[in-house]
Image: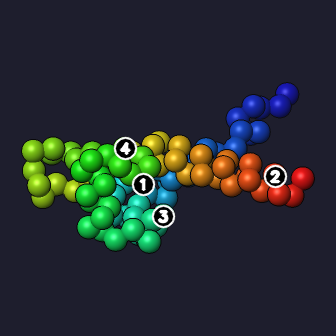
Amino acid sequence: MKHQYLDDKPTTAFILTMRYNSPYVLLDKVLQDYLPHINPKTAYQKANSQELPFPVFKADKNSNKSKFIVRITDLAKWLDNCAQDAEDEWKKVNE
């Protein structure tokens, strides 16, 4: 008898959760790892107006010193969408 869980691939969210050891990650780390071309000042301005490609939040929304946080599932969804767009474009060119 074959076990289904052995055939399942780990999801992007699962892998990111293992990488960051948390279901949440600081926006600073996401910028460093995935958006290094955006300077922090611009990123924080975009975060304040929810203009990043994924939602962000502050644990203490009443504090200006509180850092922005990204939920891993939201980061994973964005990365998966980017990868799917690239795959679709690749197929148009190569098939």
Alpha carbon distance from label 3 to label 4? 15 Å
Sequence order check: which comes first, mark 1 or mark 2? 1
Which residue position holds label 1? 21
Mark found first going from the N terminus, 1 or 4: 1
The disc placed on residue 34 is: 3
Residue marked by disc 2: 91
- Which amino acid is tagged 3? Tyr
Q: Residues within 10 Å of mark 4 (few under 14, many from 20)?
A: some
Q: At 81% from the left edge and 52% from the top edge, which residue is drawn?
A: 91
State which tag comes first along the sequence, 2 or 4.
4
Q: Find residue 41 and report its horizontal and vertical position in percent.
A: 26, 67
Mark 3 Cα shell of 10 Å, populated few (<14), some (14-19), many (≥20): few
Q: CA distance from mark 1 to mark 2?
A: 34 Å
Give how far apart the Cα atoms at labels 2 and 4 are: 29 Å
What residue is shown with label 4? 55
Q: Name the image quarter holding residue 71.
A: top left
Which residue type does callout 4 highlight? Pro
- Residue 23 percent coordinates (x, y): 40, 46
Circle nearer the N terminus (3, 1): 1
The answer to whether residue 24 shows anywhere in this view is no
Frontmost of labels 1 and 4 is: 4
Mark 3 vs 4: CB contact within 8 A: no
Three-letter code for the amino acid on which mark 1 is drawn: Asn
Q: Amino acid at mark 2?
A: Lys
Q: Position of residue 68 (x, y in %)?
A: 26, 53
Q: Nearer the viewer, residue 78 or 76?
A: 78
* Horizontal side, residue 58 vs residue 69: left or right: left
Looking at the image, can residue 34 be seen? yes
SS for callout 4: loop
> In front: mark 2 or mark 3?
2
